[in-house]
Image: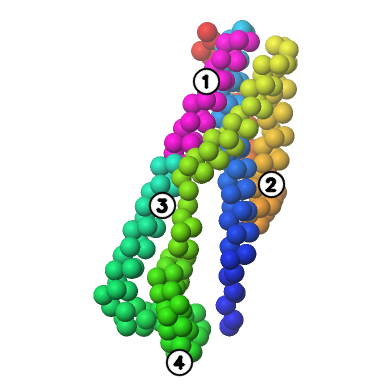
Amino acid sequence: MNQPVVTKENKDITNRLNVLRAGVLGANDGIVSIAGLVIGVASAAHDTMTVFVAGLAGLVAGALSMAGGEYTSVSTQRDTEEAAVRKEADEIETDYEGELQELADIYEKKGVSPRLAKEVAKELMDKDALAAHTEAEFNITLDEYVNPWSAALSSMFSFTCGAILPLLAITLLPIPIRVVVTFFIVLLALALTGYVSAYLGGAPKQKAVMRNVIVGMLTMIVTYLVGHFIPL
């Protein structure tokens, strides 16, 4: 069976789609988190400024938390990738023939004949032994490591974009209807982010939308009840 050819262009497209999908999911987190917070506070307090300050504080804390978590996670991933590349470089230097056979074995497992696999491995290692091994073994392209700062800023931005929606809705709407209208605005937004994330990921859209809406609905109901029974 022929293996699909993974070109640099295909990898770039996949990476862009993954970044876009992560941005949509980050916005989704912002919507759910801040919607739950402001609806909970609004059910306990009638003062609009109190609700706004609580929501704004939650937005800032959530955005920074997302950025910090993403920075730590991606930094760990980058450190792991760099360590794997250093280890591979040492192995190539100390046991070139063994690494040549290891690369040939990788291509054999993909369906290439032993003779051709050995030829391919030799040609690739003659050109750039380290690049050939890191791509075949770890799917790592040299000098194209993940950027923790980019990931952190992207997460912070996407969370903030999502969080702004419920914060503005609960703040700008008239007090008698703000909770109910915000509730339905948030559900519509969650239906949209669920659909988009499923579309980008190639997953069933109806399930993703329903799951997203139900989680958001339960979050807002629970936080509303918390604020209702513990009034300020």
Q: Are the residues at dot 2 and dot 3 in contact (C-beta closer than 8 Å)?
A: no
Looking at the image, residue 158 lies above or below residue 105: above
Gap in angstroms between the C-alphas marked 1 and 3: 30 Å
**Residue 106 lies in the magenta-colored region:** no
The residue labelled by disc 2 is: 196
Q: Can residue 181 be seen in this view?
A: yes
Residue in the image at 44% along x and 47% along y:
74
**Disc 4/disc 3 C-alpha distance (Å):** 36 Å
Asked if residue 113 is positioned above or below residue 64 in the image, the reply reads below
The amino acid at mark 2 is Val
Residue at which label 3 appears: 77
Question: Which residue is tagged 1?
Answer: 57
Q: How far apart are marks 2 and 3 (CA)?
A: 27 Å
| Between discs 4 and 2, the one toward the N terminus | 4
Mark 4 and mark 2 in contact? Answer it, CB < 8 Å.
no
Question: Circle 4 sits on which residue?
Answer: 115
